[in-house]
Amino acid sequence: MRTTRATPTPRTALARAELAAIERRLAATDALLERAYPGDTGARQPVHTAYVPGDSYTPVLPADWGRAALEAADEYGGVASVATLVGIDEALGERIAPLVRDKLLREPIEDLRIDFEDGYGDRGDDVEDADVVRAAARVEAAMAGGITPPYIGIRFKSLEASTRARGIRTLDLFIGGLLEHGDLPPGLMLTVPKVSTVAQVEAMVELTAALERAYKLPEGRLHFEVQVETPQLVLAHDGTSPLAWLPHVASGRLMGLHYGTYDYSAAIGIPARYQSLRHPAADLAKELMQLAVAGTGVRLSDGSSNLLPVGDRTEEAWRTHARLVHRSLERGFTQGWDLHPNQLLTRYLATYAFYREGWPEASVRLHDHDERRTDGAVLDEPATVRALAGFVLRGMQCGALTAAEVAAETGFDAHALTRLAHPRIDRPQRPQEVS
């Protein structure tokens, strides 16, 4: 007769008191990580921000930009021909051309910034006041017609001493003008330029809270993004990086860091001819930006290319812009700036090509994960699976991938991808986040 041996009870050596001491020691760390590093919400991030001078915005400007981009493409044989021109594989170019054309007709601008700073200049208080009020009325007209981009807002003059009063007045007039005609756009974004110190971000927190009280808005309704275009914000006088403090002093209002290509380059002495998104000094600043906001939910945007695709330099500018967009995407900057309608063409061609190029491998790896397969060529860590899901999700959100093909190839819909990419998604979304 076979006897059954009892399974020995596992024994550990640490006493309950010792374990409790470890818990007490790490309680503050646990609270810090929960509060300060909530992760991304998975809400849509625009692939670009288009800047237009404050007096030139009209409700139909996005559609005008889309049509202008397509007209420019047609002069070169169509969208697929431009794709080949900028170095995209011919077959891939043919595949994405209809998607890009549809995007330029349906949603040519994902994020629009009405500029009252460098792109507008100093035109005197009376002129700027009138232009701000007019811009607010036009945004409300676009909202009424259902033709606002998913994200829209203004860049006002900086909080430096020489422009502070004018910038605050512009912001106040814009918010008041929007509310006078209706409500704030769901994707309202405020851009703070030329930030040099943590104190300026703290002042912006105070300013937005004061505006909420004055206009009887819900607490926390106003959010902003910071332009990183001064060396003092990257490296302070005491050798520390103020960038690392920004998410933690902004009371949840800081939504993004945007790299300012030309102000930053000029400030550290790079000759004008060599100022570029791909300069090593730019890479250093942007890598520090990435480190500073990793895990905080604050998003990143690359800057702009000032070589515009017009006239005799159109082809050169398109090639340069497409390379820069692809390079930014490779380095984890999924957003950038566009300054001209013709840049929309290469923005979407390069972006769609990036996601389509990575799609076959990402779909197989996500499918293998979903099926719990371990016989594939790559054994992905959970963190890599999250990155794969985030990649596919961003491709869907911008239109490079369709929901139908993603579901068919991976077994995931947008909701499942969001939860896979962002495990802490159960926390509430902030008001301006657009799905």
Image: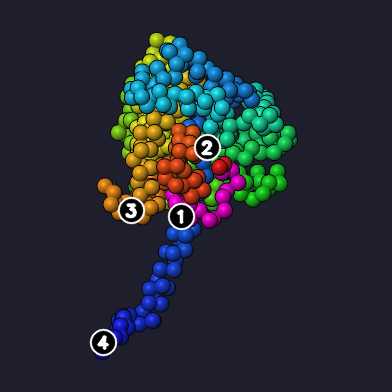
Q: Nearer the viewer, residue 401 or 196?
A: 401
Q: For residue 114, which quarter of the picture?
A: top right
Inspect the image, locate mark 4, and give the three-letter code of the amino acid beneath it.
Arg
Place of residue 96 in the rendered image (x, y in percent of width and height, measured from the top left): 43, 27
Estimate the spatial distance between the alpha carbons at disc 1 and disc 2, rounded to whole Å. Answer: 31 Å
> Where does label 2 land, which residue?
192
Estimate the spatial distance between the alpha carbons at disc 2 and disc 3, rounded to whole Å. Answer: 48 Å
Estimate the spatial distance between the alpha carbons at disc 1 and disc 4, rounded to whole Å. Answer: 49 Å
Whether 359 is drawn above or below 275: the answer is: below
Place of residue 301 in the rendered image (x, y in percent of width and height, measured from the top left): 44, 37
Would residue 427 be counted in the magenta stretch? yes
Estimate the spatial distance between the alpha carbons at disc 3 and disc 4, rounded to whole Å. Answer: 38 Å
Q: Give the residues in magenta.
A: 418-433
> In front of the other: label 3 or label 4?
4
> Where does label 1 land, which residue?
423
Inspect the image, locate mark 3, and give the three-letter code of the amino acid beneath it.
Arg
SS at circle 4: loop
In the picture, the disc for residue 2 is 4
- For marks 3 and 4 on the same chain, the one whose residue lies earlier in the sequence: 4
> In front of the other: label 1 or label 4?
4
> In front of the other: label 1 or label 3?
3
- For marks 1 and 3 on the same chain, the one whose residue lies earlier in the sequence: 3
Point 64% across, 25% down: residue: 59
